[in-house]
Amino acid sequence: MDNRQNMIEQLTDVGMLLKREIENKVLVRRGTVGNDRDGMPLLINGRGEAYRVNDTAVSLWNMCNGITFDELYLEVLRISSDDEDDVKKSLETMIKQFHKISVIEVKEMGVSAARRSGTRT
């Protein structure tokens, strides 16, 4: 197997691992929203670290109010005209970035949320 194929397989494995980290999990926003001096929106985590974002990111962050990734995906898909796969990939990337900068928490799904989404625990 050549190096390129090996690298592709490794990236696929990492992608699948990250995907499993958010499947059947509840997304809960953390921190606050503010504006910088220029009026650009900021997401501010619990450590006071501020990240300049766009209005779309703030809207997505606001939607992370205890819903599952699948619920968030379906809501975004409902209001988007983009391809389903593109929407899912973009949303996964955004959620991973939010988690990395500590403005959302990815929590285990409780029994009530599992029943609401139709999953068994």
Image: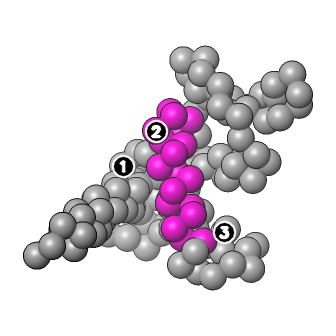
Where 55 falls versus 79 (above or below)? above
Residue 36 point in image, percent of width and height: 81, 25
Please provide the residue range marked out in magenta: 87-105
In the picture provided, is 27 more to the left or to the right than 39? Answer: left
Identify the element where label 3 is drawn.
helix
Number of marks drawn: 3
Q: In the rendered structure, which disc, 1 or 3, sits on the residue that comes first in sequence?
A: 3
Residue 119, image quadrant: bottom left
Q: Which mark is residue 51?
A: none
Number of the label disc, if any, that sits on residue 75: 3
Q: Residue at x 65, y 46 (%)?
A: 61
Q: Nearer the viewer, mark 2 or mark 1?
A: 2
Residue 16 or 118: which is nearer the viewer?
16
Could you tell me if the residues under marks 3 and 2 are in contact, i.e. CB atoms within 8 Å? Answer: no
Residue plotted at (66% across, 69% down): 75
- Residue drawn at point x = 65 percent, y = 31 percent: 51
Question: Are the residues at dot 1 and dot 3 in contact (C-beta closer than 8 Å)?
Answer: no
Mark 3 closeness class: few <14, some 14–19, many ≥20 residues within 10 Å: few
- Residue at screen point 51% across, 34% down: 101
Amino acid on which disc 1 is placed: Glu
Q: Secondary structure at mark 1?
A: strand
